[in-house]
Amino acid sequence: MDLAYIPSPSESVWHLGPIPIRAYALCLIAGIVAACWIAEARMRSRGAPKWAVLDIAVWAVPFGIVGARLYHVFTSPDAYFGPDGDPWKALAVWEGGLGIPGAVLLGAVGVWLGCRQLKLPFAMVADAVVPGIPVGQAIGRLGNWFNQELYGKPLDAWWAVAIDEGHRVAGYSEYATFHPTFLYELLWNLGVAAVLILADRKWKFGAGRAVALYVVLYWTGRFWIEGLRIDPAEGALGLRLNQWVSIVVVAAAIVYLLLVRGRRQVFVLDGGERVTVDWDAPEAEAAGYVDGALPKGAEPGEIEDAAYGADDEDDDAEAAPDRPEDDVIADEPAAEAPPAAGKTRDDS
């Protein structure tokens, strides 16, 4: 086998009896699970209720999928409404074709609705969950590899991806290997996730600033990757639509980062209710937060209660050191002895 290029999978659909199992769908599901797992860990470290991310995902995932499909159809209308298009194919999500901008936009609406239902601050949740999004995107891009789609210009190099003739873009049938732009985006997304986590650990983002940084990083990479792609897409002035979107949203996100200030918020318990405070507030420290995060598995206030309990025990120990029970009587006031013969109290 020639290993001078990346081979494409020979199959993208397997059948379990009459049920088709599609690699694209499996990659999307795996990406969603990974994003939710990361979001759950980060939200719990900020004191959010256990598995709140699942209640939010119930809203965010379907909204994100619908938004992604709508954006794809909007930016590639000829495949569905052109002379040779099939409008019903616009519903065939399983065949591929999801636009990240639509997924993020409508997915954010779903997160907002979930936060309203759970009475959680939207900006706080968004900053916590955002590093999981590029990880989910990276895993989802593997589905494009199975479908042999979203590749770039012809390329003769060891990292080029081989595309079967039946999947080649019109006008490029004589070429066999191409830029694996889906792989470029996969690796870029993993880098974005790493930078977000490290930057948030250092600067403790709040007020949606981690989301703004994600927008800057992701769309900067998307701009140059989009320039390599050859699949049909709307465009103007020599740039594809997604490149114009990149310019607009990156500029807006940079302005947001420059103008908006906000500190990480965390949850503490106040009379059994979760309330938000700054990550370095005395209440957060008392609740057990260390450098803006709870230790794994802890709840806000557990460590606080344990500390108070320990203090009480220490105070008791100082007030009543260990001693035999029989000696306790010695602590009671001694009975006064009768005055000696010939003496009165005034004589003493």
Image: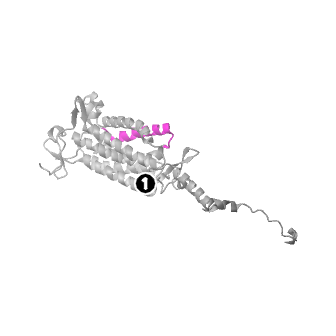
Q: Residue furthest left?
A: 1
Quarter of the view holding residue 241: top left
Residue 221 visible at all: yes
Quadrant for the C terminus, please.
Answer: bottom right
Q: Percent x, y for residue 137?
A: 32, 44
First to last magenta residue range:
98-121
Residue 113 magenta = yes
Drawn side of residue 123 relative to residue 196, left or right = right
The one nearer the camera, 45 or 346, is 346
Asked which quadrant contains residue 72, the reply is: top left
Above or below for 172 versus 320: above
How would you rate the neighbour count of disc 1 (Cα within 10 Å): few for under 14, some for 14-19, many for 20 or more?
A: some
Colouring used for the render: one colour
Where does residue 331 sit, x and y in percent of width and height?
69, 62
The residue nearer to you, when weighing 184 against 277, is 277
Q: Main secondary structure of the magenta part?
A: helix
The residue that mark 1 highlights is: 200
x and y percentages locating residue 179 in the rendered image: 21, 48
Q: Quadrant of residue 97?
A: top left
Identified by mark 1, the residue type is Asp
The number of discs equals 1
In this rendering, the answer to whether 31 lies above or below 4 is: above
Element at label 1: helix
Q: Residue 24: percent from the left, percent from the top?
A: 26, 38
Residue 280 within the segment the image draws in magenta: no
Is residue 252 in view?
no
